[in-house]
Amino acid sequence: MGYQKRIMTQLIKQIETIQKKETTLLSIDLSKKLTEEIRESFKPGDMLASQVELTERFGVSRAIIRGALEILETTGVIQRVQGKGAVVVHQQIGYPIHRYTRFTEILEKNGRKAETRVLRKIGIPADKEVAHYLEIEVGEPVVLLESLGKMDGAPISRALQYFPLEKVYDVMRIYDGGSLHQFIFERYNMKLRRVLSLINAQLPHERDCSVLKIENYIPILQVKSVNIDENTEEPIEYVDTRFKSTAIQLSFDLSGDIIDE
């Protein structure tokens, strides 16, 4: 009897595991359908149908509906309000890449509230990749600035920005938020211009998931860029930005300000 009971317990656990995986996959599939529908037919502030209505409409269990809504909330598409239901937060916005791409300006032009918060500032020796793009020696001191970009209060980007310490020391010393390029212009009379952008789609790292509030299966858009001082044409900034892919649609402005020279 003891042996049969153990076998039965193992079978039940295996069945439960399979059911959980199936529910998760169905929730992911449904979240994709709802995201597409929201982008096409909803605007910020609209209410999503109730769980009961969604269950009846799609013919699936409440567990699948709850899982799909959790994904939509995690990816910043909706916000669930106690006693009201799910509210559409925002839709994808176009994010043009050109010589003078600026996070704050792009969001404000789209009628969104932009916010940049510094997560950490440290001085570190340049590794091989950073040294290459900043055209300095490996081991030279650089400022590493990690920041969180928000749109309408929701996290949409995590940026790792590297600067030669001796050229913009005040970034390390007193910068604490807002438009960084405007800060550098006002402090050092440097107008930064983008000369290179490398774009890649990938799954997020653990730190990306934590900062951007996303699950590890939600893709991010990684943009590595180099910005130079327009007067001296010396590299001043190397930045590795990770965008939440559900919030941003990257585009290229080919009207004259091309990113590469």
Image (tube, rainbow, N blue to C red):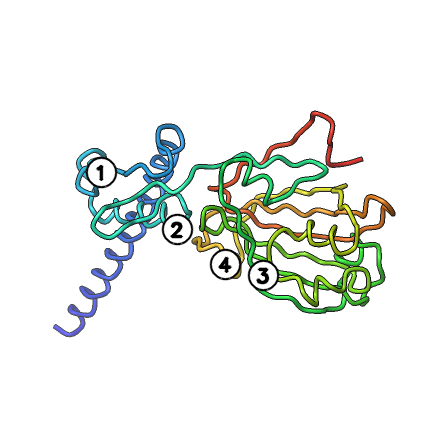
Residue 51 position, x and y percent, is 21, 43
> Helix, strand, or loop for circle 4?
helix
How crowded pointer 2 is (Cα within 10 Å; few <14, some 14-19, many 20+) is rated as some
Q: Amino acid at mark 3?
A: Val
Q: Amino acid at mark 2?
A: Thr
Q: Relative to residue 6, is residue 102 depicted above or below?
A: above
Q: Which residue is mark 3?
A: 118
Q: Could you tell me which residue is drawn at 20 percent across and 50 percent down?
A: 83
**Relative depth, front residue between 95 and 53:** 95
Mark linked to residue 211:
4
Q: Which residue is mark 2?
A: 74
Label 4 to label 3: alpha-carbon separation: 12 Å
Label 2 vs 4, first from the N-terminus = 2
How crowded pointer 3 is (Cα within 10 Å; few <14, some 14-19, many 20+) is rated as some
Q: Is residue 220 left or right of residue 121?
A: left
Label 2 to label 1: alpha-carbon separation: 19 Å
